[in-house]
């Protein structure tokens, strides 16, 4: 601890519970079970006072060569590691991933078009699968 009583660096283990962010209250193990490794990588590279045990860093695909000095941040490293991991996905999986993204985008566009042209009662029926 420093003079003001704040923790400068906290190394999280599997049972550690996050006290911040969109997954506040969940343990690191729960996030791994939910396949939120990307979020944990983001936390590692973007929050200065948080690190993970070596075992967890390996599991979220942060190899020794990609580790940063803590406390500290390196947001650009998160993007590099994400791109590197995406390139390792086989062609079939990558094309499937791109197809899913394209379908999600089309669905969002359709919903936006419907919202722009329909009244509230029609939209309610549509959202409740009554149309």
Image: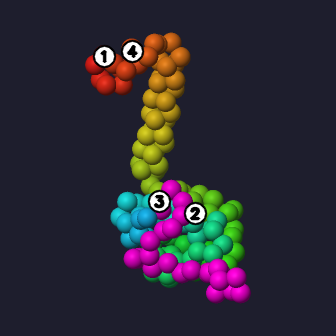
Decide which of tag 3 and tag 4 comes sooner along the chain.
Answer: 3
Work out which quarter of the rendered image holds the C terminus and state it: top left
Question: Please, what secondary structure does the residue beneath circle 4 have?
Answer: helix
Residue sitting at x 40%, y 60%: 35
Q: Which one is earlier in the sequence, the residue at label 2 or at label 3?
A: 3
Label drawn at residue 23: 3
**Viewer-nearest of discs 2 and 3:** 3
Task: Name the element at disc 1.
Answer: loop
**Residue 54 percent across, percent down from the top left:** 50, 82
Q: Main secondary structure of the magenta part?
A: loop
Give how far apart the Cα atoms at labels 3 and 4 are.
Answer: 34 Å
Q: Callout 2: 10 Å neighbours few (<14), some, many (20+)?
A: some
Using the image, tell me which numbered label, if any, was put on residue 121. Answer: 4
* Residue 59 x/y as whole percent: 45, 73
Q: Which mark is residue 42?
A: 2
Direction from residue 111 to residue 63 in the image, left or right:
right
Q: Can you identify the residue that label 1 sits on?
A: 131
Q: Secondary structure at mark 2?
A: helix
CA separation in Å, label 1 and label 3:
35 Å
């Amino acid at each position: 601890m420093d003079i003001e009583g704040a923790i400068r660096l906290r190394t999280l283990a599997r049972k550690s519970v996050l006290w911040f962010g969109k997954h506040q209250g969940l343990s690191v193990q729960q996030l791994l079970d939910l396949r939120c490794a990307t979020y944990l990588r983001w936390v590692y590279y973007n929050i200065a006072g948080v690190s993970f045990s070596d075992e967890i860093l390996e599991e979220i695909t942060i190899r020794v060569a990609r580790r940063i000095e803590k406390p500290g941040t390196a947001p650009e490293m998160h993007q590099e590691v994400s791109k590197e991991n995406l390139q390792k996905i086989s062609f079939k999986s990558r094309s499937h991933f791109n197809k899913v993204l394209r379908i999600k985008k089309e669905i969002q566009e359709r919903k936006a078009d419907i919202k722009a042209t329909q009244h509230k009662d029609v939209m309610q029926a549509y959202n409740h699968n009554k149309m």
